[in-house]
Image: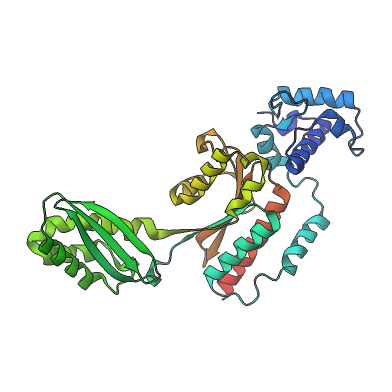
Amino acid sequence: MASLINLSDRKKRILKFIIKEYIDTAEPVGSRTISKNKDLGVSAATIRNEMSDLEELGLLMQPHTSAGRIPSPEAYELYVQNLLFEDQSFEKRESNMKILEDMNFFDNITQINSLIEQSLNMLTKVTNYTAFAVSKRNTEAIYIKHVSLVKINERQVVIVTVLDNGEVKSCTANLSTEVGDDTVKLIGSMINDNLVGKNVAGVDIDLLDFIRRKLDVYSAVFDDIAMNLSSAFITENNVELALDGATNMLDYPEFHDIERAKSFMDFLSSKDEVKRILDNEGIKKDDINIILGNEDMGSVVKDCAIITANFHYKGSVIGKIGLIAPKRMDYDKAYSVISYLQSKINSIINDS
């Protein structure tokens, strides 16, 4: 990829103009469009030559038969790393902050769930992108209400767990030995006697081992059931994913294709997939992480950009908030909003 030092000032100005124009219009940018910008002060012929050079450097692409050009993935990376805030005025940043402050989203908010909900709502209203928050789940505040074992056949049992927050979890346990109705009933009673009223965080290996010993001759069957119980309580539920504006992406031309739109919705519904993408190390700007999609991230995310910011409690990261949008997102605005919300969330959490 071309580095910034390889580009003349004129090439940098033209590249920035093309990127910003494409962000605004989603249309390939031609030399005539660029030449109308009097601030550049360059003829159409010179612009065509510069665009040709930028294309050879891998920073511009020509989609289909269009005469215009669009930024390449390498161009976005160069832009985010080096050009993003080069000409954003102090007044423009102050104006962005004033708009956010005037919305008064955070009046009298003290609960973390309400804080995240309001933050996501603000993000979608201001940017029209999809907003998300990932946070560590407070399993100490969630209690087990009831566990039911439903025998399907001699080798399979469905485990249905009801939590006091209204969640219902179910999974199927494949048993290593055949069981009768009385055995299933006995094990179910023992599980309820020891788990009902416990918080989810308290379901650990020691507690399950205690139940196992009490069941004695039925311990092997319980082991098969406990394996599913522990994965439901300990592994799956330790991270929460909240979304707002999921359908906003359908407003953008990149997602007008029905299959592509469906794939994006499927991606958002997979907590593990979202977390996998968010674990990528992107381009760091202060305490903000900007992830530019690539082929390794899959067909849905490769043309997207994601901006995230961590929020902390007593020095420890307890979650992150962010935006996902087409790669031609308005990085200036998205960065400003995310930075503002990060500061607000950290302040409210740690001062309450």
Look at 70% across and 29% down and name the residue there: 59
Looking at the rendered structure, the number of numbered marks drawn on it comes to: 0
244 versus 329 height, above or below: below
In the picture, which quadrant includes the N terminus? top right
User: Which colour style is shown?
Assistant: rainbow
Identify which residue, 89 or 242, lies in the foreground: 242
Look at 25% across and 70% down and name the residue there: 195
Q: Is residue 49 left or right of residue 278?
A: right
Q: Is residue 10 left or right of residue 71?
A: right
The image quarter in which residue 13 lies: top right
Where is residue 316? Give x, y as percent.
50, 62
213 versus 61 height, above or below: below
Identify which residue, 167 or 306, lies in the foreground: 167
Which residue of the protein is positioned furthest toward the left in this rendering? 217
In the picture, which quadrant includes the C terminus? bottom right
Look at 22% across and 58% down and name the residue there: 226
182 versus 28 height, above or below: below
Is residue 192 something that shows in the picture?
A: yes
Where is residue 343? Give x, y as percent.
64, 63
Identify which residue, 44 or 245, lies in the foreground: 245
Is residue 279 something that shows in the picture?
A: no
182 versus 265 height, above or below: below
Identify which residue, 41 or 31, lies in the foreground: 31
Look at 18% across and 56% down and name the residue there: 223
The image quarter in which residue 204 lies: bottom left
Where is residue 283? Give x, y as percent.
61, 44
